[in-house]
């Protein structure tokens, strides 16, 4: 999966509309920037309007006029519905959704676990569901949903037998209710101080669980979307961008008592955004769905 600025297989135009969650900074911002440079119409969203407008102005100062801004807090259903109504009014729909917004906390405090799941898993789900009817699946390229995830949330990294059996990759019966019930059990275990003994994420932080549930949701959603009419496909995939030099990574380094120079492999958000953009813009023929990508190739959940 190689990104190429001169890719002659380009299928998009300025009428191709992309919405990116959590894009006032970090990876989301660079995804918006890269897509706008490719000539797509791009919707930058931010929970804080001031931060969002500042980001918009910076991009406009670069001459990127195809970027628009709308407020979006992924944990606030009302905010998500307002974005949906605006996308409908402004563009009559849209083509690509990139669920990028996330938080990473460094505690085992219940409120932090709750916020992390509300943002990274339930929030991404709310956005997907509310915006889903606006996806222009009948367009020649089909519609695409990209979940920015993490290898920390790969099922095979979890020791917890309950999770392994409930969310297992070959589970025919896996559905959203099951994922939600596992998420609820996880929060209960955090609340009652049993998260460690119950064998939740190896590093003990809620971030891994939030991405585990997000990845499971991708598999379920992709499964249900296989019933879409052949000429109206909606593809959904997870991607792990790897370690990025952003505020999120800075928080992690601080927690570990490290600075940037002590960590190898931290890549700039601009560089990493190319992989996400590449996945979002792959040609229709052979477009994957229900897969997990990292370092430019698919790996098992
Ligand atoms: P940043 O912390 O730099 O940016 C996160 C973005 O999400 C910000 O714009 C933030 O807004 C936004 N956000 C947080 N909560 C909400 C919310 N409730 N509603 C809307 N937006 C919200 O993180 P990165 O750019 O590093 O991360 C981007 C993605 O990449 C995430 O999904 C992350 O999990 C993933 N990732 C990151 C890695 C890394 O090393 N950094 C590694 C692997 C995956 P605000 O400015 O208001 O806080």
Image (cartoon, rainbow, N blue to C red):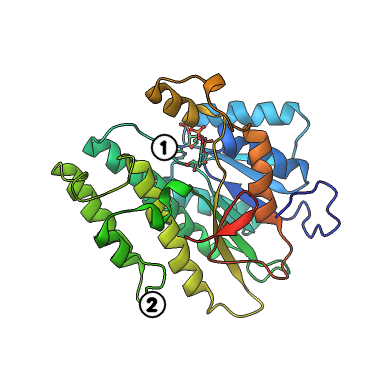
Q: CA distance from mark 2 to mark 1?
A: 31 Å
Query: Mark 1 = which residue?
Result: 103
Residue sitting at x 51%, y 58%:
131
In this rendering, position of residue 135 left or right of residue 17: left
> Camera-side residue: 82 or 254?
254
Q: Quadrant of the N terminus?
A: bottom right
Residue sitting at x 67%, y 48%:
277
Q: Position of residue 161 (x, y in %)?
A: 26, 60
Disc 2 secondary structure class = loop
For marks 2 and 1, the one nearer the N-term is 1
> Camera-side residue: 108 or 201?
201
Q: Position of residue 293 (x, y in %)?
A: 58, 55
Does the residue tagged 2 have its C-beta within 8 Å of any atom of ligand 1?
no
Query: Mark 2 = which residue?
Result: 172
Residue 145 in view, yes or no: yes
In this rendering, position of residue 251 left or right of residue 133: left
> Camera-side residue: 8 or 36?
8
In this rendering, position of residue 276 left or right of residue 149: right
Residue sitting at x 28%, y 32%:
107
Residue 158, disc: none
Q: Position of residue 151 (x, y in %)?
A: 47, 48
> Camera-side residue: 159 or 26?
159
Which image quadrant is residue 192 in?
Answer: top left
Disc 1 secondary structure class = loop
Does the residue tagged 1 have its C-beta within 8 Å of any atom of ligand 1?
yes
Residue 66 in view, yes or no: no
Which image quadrant is residue 229 in?
Answer: bottom right
């Amino acid at each position: 999966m190689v990104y190429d600025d001169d890719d002659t297989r380009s299928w998009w135009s300025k009428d191709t509309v992309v919405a990116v969650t959590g894009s006032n900074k970090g990876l989301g911002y660079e995804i918006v920037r890269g897509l706008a440079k490719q000539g797509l119409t791009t919707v930058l969203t931010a929970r804080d309007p001031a931060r969002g407008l500042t980001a918009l102005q910076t991009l406009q100062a670069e001459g990127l006029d195809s970027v628009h801004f709308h407020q979006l807090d992924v944990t606030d259903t009302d905010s998500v519905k307002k974005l949906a109504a605006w996308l409908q009014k402004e563009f009559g729909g849209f083509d690509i959704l990139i669920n990028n917004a996330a938080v990473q906390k460094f505690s085992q405090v219940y409120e932090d676990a709750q916020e992390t799941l509300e943002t990274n898993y339930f929030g991404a789900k709310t956005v997907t569901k509310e915006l889903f009817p606006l996806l222009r699946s009948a367009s020649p390229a089909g519609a695409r949903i990209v979940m920015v995830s993490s290898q920390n949330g790969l099922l095979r990294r979890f020791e917890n037998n309950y999770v392994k059996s409930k969310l297992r990759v070959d589970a025919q019966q896996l559905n959203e209710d099951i994922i939600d019930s596992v998420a609820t059990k996880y929060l209960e275990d955090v609340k009652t101080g049993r998260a460690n003994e119950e064998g939740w994420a190896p590093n003990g932080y809620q971030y891994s669980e939030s991405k585990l549930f997000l990845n499971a949701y991708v598999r379920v959603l992709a499964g249900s979307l296989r019933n879409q009419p052949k000429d109206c496909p909606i593809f959904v995939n997870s991607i792990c961008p790897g370690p990025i030099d952003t505020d999120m990574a800075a928080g992690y380094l601080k927690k570990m008592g490290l600075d940037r120079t002590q960590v190898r492999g931290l890549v700039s958000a601009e560089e990493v955004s190319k992989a996400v953009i590449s996945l979002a813009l792959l040609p229709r023929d052979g477009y994957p769905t229900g897969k997990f990508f990292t370092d430019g190739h698919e790996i098992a959940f």
